[in-house]
């Protein structure tokens, strides 16, 4: 880990699967204790990290839990704040301490989304441009524009809020896991904000799924989240859109079918105020 003095209230939680070399490069960059939750890697990740980075707490899982592995990591961390990172991302020097200070200063803030710079050239992730221009404005009790979503690899969470709404669930898994958690936080009255003064670097791993596969996985998550939290007419519109689009979208809907019973058991539509904010965001796009 970096030699900077870590904030005692922060742990970095990283989840990974079969990306040993990416981890060995990124883990030493974090300026806080790290909990690595390994999603059943078969490439020697656990052994390599234990051998080369003994300061990292490694939690090996015997199967791939997807994003729910982050919930395991938060439970193990035991600190008031947890910064998430992927195996190909890390928080810039000073950013963890800065983010923790903002969390302490804004007690309603459950999620702080950092500025994300992509690749060696440091390109601003387009999603950050959207967050900075959030039509939800900047409430007085938040340190930046209000959000109804976030990017997990660039977010710090308040452990109490995260735990209270159940963390990441085993139904959605990955990617697109942030939406359901964000909706539940908003429904419970917590705030989420984009803060441009805090930075995360993301150097996308070459060991990534093909774009079509990723898009199908995102649509799977969209449908399952909609079933759990959106009104029935919205679910129907989403299904119709996916069927019209065809290709990866339709494949994603099909892939969601085995998990629909679990999603229905967890169904709890969000309140009207959250739906109103969702319409505001949709109207600005």
Image: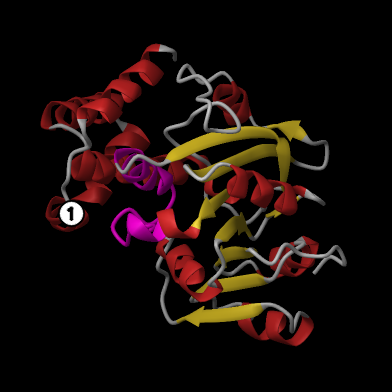
Vertical order, 186 against 146 (above or below):
below
Residue 8 screen position, x and y as percent:
69, 67
- Magenta stretch: give its range: 162-187
Vertical order, 193 against 39 (above or below):
above
- Looking at the figure, which quarter contains the N terminus? bottom right
* Mark 1 residue crowding within 10 angstroms, few (<14) / some (14–19) / many (20+): some
Q: Can residue 202 be seen in this view?
A: no
Residue 191 screen position, x and y as percent:
45, 38
Between 55 and 244, the residue placed more toward the observer is 55
Residue 21 screen position, x and y as percent:
73, 68
Residue 255 screen position, x and y as percent:
27, 50
- Asked where in the image residue 49 lies, by quadrant, the reply is bottom right
Q: Report the side of 128 relative to 169 (left or right).
A: right
Q: Report the side of 179 relative to 147 (left or right).
A: left
Tell me which residue sits at (43%, 12%) in the image: 284
- Looking at the figure, which quarter contains the C terminus? top left
Q: How many marks?
A: 1
Tell me which residue sits at (71%, 63%) in the image: 22
Instruction: Verify whether residue 285 appears in magenta.
Output: no
Q: Disc 1 designates what residue?
A: 266
């Amino acid at each position: 880990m970096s030699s900077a003095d870590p904030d005692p209230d922060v742990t970095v939680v990283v989840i990974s699967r079969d990306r040993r070399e990416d981890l060995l490069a990124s883990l030493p960059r974090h300026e806080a204790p790290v909990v690595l939750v390994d999603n059943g890697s078969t490439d020697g990740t656990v052994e390599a990290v234990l051998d080369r980075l003994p300061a990292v707490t490694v939690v090996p899982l015997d199967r791939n839990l997807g994003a729910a592995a982050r919930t395991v990591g938060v439970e193990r961390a035991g600190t008031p704040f947890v910064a998430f990172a992927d195996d190909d991302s890390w928080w810039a020097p000073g950013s963890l301490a800065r983010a923790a200070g903002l969390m302490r200063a804004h007690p309603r803030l459950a999620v702080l989304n950092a500025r994300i710079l992509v690749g060696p050239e440091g390109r601003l992730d387009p999603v950050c441009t959207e967050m900075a221009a959030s039509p939800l404005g900047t409430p007085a009790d938040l340190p930046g524009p209000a959000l109804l979503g976030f990017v997990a690899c660039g977010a710090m969470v308040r452990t109490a809020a995260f735990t209270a709404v159940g963390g990441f669930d085993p139904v959605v898994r990955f990617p697109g896991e942030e939406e359901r958690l964000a909706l539940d936080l908003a429904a419970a009255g917590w705030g989420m904000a984009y803060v441009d003064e805090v930075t995360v670097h993301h150097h996308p791993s070459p060991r990534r799924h093909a774009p079509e596969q990723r898009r199908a996985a995102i649509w799977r998550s969209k449908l399952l989240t909609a079933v759990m939290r959106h009104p029935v007419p919205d679910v129907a519109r989403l299904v119709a859109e996916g069927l019209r689009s065809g290709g990866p979208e339709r494949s994603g809907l099909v892939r969601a079918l085995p998990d629909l019973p679990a999603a229905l058991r967890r169904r709890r539509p969000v309140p009207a105020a959250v739906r109103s904010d969702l319409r505001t965001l949709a109207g600005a796009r």
